[in-house]
Image (cartoon, rainbow, N blue to C red):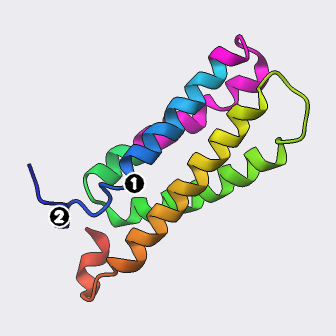
Amino acid sequence: MTPLSQRPFAPVLPLLWVAIALHVVALLLAFGAAEAWRFMPIAVVYLALLACLARGWRWAGYVTFFASAVSGIIVLSTLWSVNALPGWWKLATLSAHWLTAGAVFTVLWHAAPSDPDQLGD
């Protein structure tokens, strides 16, 4: 097992798993409604980003931060709309997205490489 210093995004991975799980649960909660299917591509993208973050790729952290922040805004915009998804799911998903964005921001902020050659790793 590699030490935490070589896996800087390890604290982010559980939050991203929760976000992915909530996107899959949306399909079950809405009984396959069309509005729930729009969350599936996001879950697939998050799964790919999770694999990249697990390898410690810094560029994936920037993409994950942006994707989580924007996804949180999208969920926030649907918070007061009436649809097949319950309010608790929307709040949980909003929290998962913004906690993920905050955790990624923290990792990127504290683990900024001093050597420009490390930016591509």
Mark number for residue 6? 2
Camera-nearest residue between 90 and 60: 90
User: As displayed, is residue 3 above or below residue 81?
Assistant: below
Main SS type for the magenta part? Answer: helix
Magenta region includes residue 121 = no
Q: Which mark is residue 12?
A: 1
In this image, 41 relative to 105: left or right? right
| Residue 27 percent location from the top left of the image | 65, 19
User: Of residues 36 and 60, which is closer to you in this image?
Assistant: 36
* Local SS, label 1: loop
The amino acid pointed to by label 2 is: Gln
User: In the figure, is residue 7 to the left or right of 99?
Assistant: left
114 to 111, vertically: above or below: below
- Give the spatial CA distance, label 1 vs label 2: 14 Å
Query: Which residue sits at x=48%, y=38%?
Result: 18
- The residue under the point 12% across, 59% down is 3
